[in-house]
């Protein structure tokens, strides 16, 4: 089982869109795939049409009242399952900060389902917190979408700094550019500078309205725009991820 967290300190950078579209592609290729929605906003859950079945489910998973496996739901797509988030996921930091060995919590929960899945995507809330520390140390890869703008790059650099200061394994960190606007010189300049950095995948996701339409269709991009340029971009990105992180 390979575990990949979609993460950024910043919100609104395309984490959820990537988690869902990459997970869909993974499942389509026959990998048993799970999306674990850790964001109280529940956007991944929404795209896969899932809702927590128990009150305060996210909280109960973290405090041990509920097994991770029993929170898993099937999506409408073959090989693709989801652990939905509810608003109680907002308490994750408080719960974990009251726990001994909180940094090992995500790893120990994931170990209970490791025989059941080939690939697990964790859709993280933005920020850096106790929950993120547990994610950083408990998963194989941290996949970070970055919009090629000044503020976005500042947040990327803060994350790198955080990894350094906390002795975290920065080799887990992989990045791709997201919401790229070809009309903007700044986007080109930032991309060209950062491509020298091996942290970044060559494939990137442009700013495209087909991605936004996932909200209207309440489903992964491929289900309503399989031959679109946007779908092609996620396919290219998935190919690179597979080469570097899965095979
Ligand atoms: N490549 C893209 N092009 C256009 N809109 C996008 C793109 N990626 C995401 N969006 C839209 O931007 C918003 C934030 O994206 P989302 O994936 O939810 O970000 P995050 O999970 O990082 O907060 C959503 O409305 C989404 O539809
Ligand atoms: Mg999100």
Image: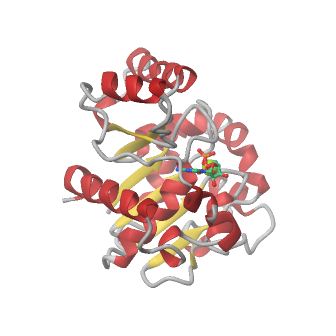
Which residue appears farthest toward the front when viewing the image?
183
Q: Position of residue 1 (x, y in %)?
A: 32, 63
Q: Is residue 238 left or right of residue 228?
A: left
**Residue 236 in sight here:** yes
Nearest to the observer: residue 123 or residue 73: 123
Q: Position of residue 111 (x, y in %)?
A: 41, 60
Quadrant housing residue 212:
bottom right
Left or right, 125 with respect to 137, comes to: right
Q: Does residue 101 appear in this view?
A: no
Which residue: 68% across, 62% down? 65
Residue 95 found in image quarter: top right
Tell me the quarter of the picture where residue 210 sits. bottom right
Q: Residue 155: image x %, image y %?
A: 53, 23
Residue at 51% of width from left, 78% of height from top? Answer: 223
Q: Quadrant of the C terminus?
A: bottom left
User: Which residue is rendered at x = 39% and y = 75% of the image?
Assistant: 27
| As drawn, 205 above or below 112 | above
Above or below, 133 against 194 in this view is below
* Residue at left offset 29%, top offset 42%: 201
Q: Nearer the viewer, residue 62 or 174?
A: 174
User: In the rendered picture of this protein, how many numbered marks are placed on residues?
Assistant: 0
- Front-most of residues 227 and 53: 227
């Amino acid at each position: 089982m390979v575990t990949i967290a979609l993460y950024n300190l910043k919100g609104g950078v395309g984490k959820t869109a990537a988690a869902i579209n990459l997970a869909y592609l993974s499942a389509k290729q026959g990998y048993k795939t799970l999306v674990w929605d850790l964001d109280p906003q529940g956007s991944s859950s929404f795209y896969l049409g899932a809702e927590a079945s128990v009150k305060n489910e996210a909280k109960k998973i973290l405090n041990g009242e509920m097994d991770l496996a029993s929170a898993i739901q099937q999506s409408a797509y073959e090989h693709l399952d989801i652990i939905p988030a509810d608003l109680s996921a907002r308490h994750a930091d408080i719960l974990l900060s009251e726990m001994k060995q909180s940094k090992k919590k995500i790893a120990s929960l994931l170990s209970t389902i490791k025989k059941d899945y080939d690939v697990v995507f964790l859709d993280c809330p933005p920020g850096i917190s106790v929950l993120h520390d547990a994610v950083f140390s408990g998963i194989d890869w941290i996949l970070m979408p970055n919009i090629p703008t000044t503020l976005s790059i500042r947040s990327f650099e803060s994350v790198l700094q955080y990894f350094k200061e906390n002795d975290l394994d920065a080799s887990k960190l992989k990045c791709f550019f997201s919401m790229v606007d070809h009309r903007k010189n700044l986007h080109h300049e930032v991309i060209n500078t950062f491509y020298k950095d091996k942290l970044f995948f060559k494939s990137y996701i442009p700013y495209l309205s087909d991605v936004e339409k996932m909200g209207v269709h309440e489903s992964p991009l491929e289900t309503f725009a399989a031959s679109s340029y946007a779908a092609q971009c996620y396919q290219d990105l998935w190919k690179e991820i597979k080469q570097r992180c899965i095979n």
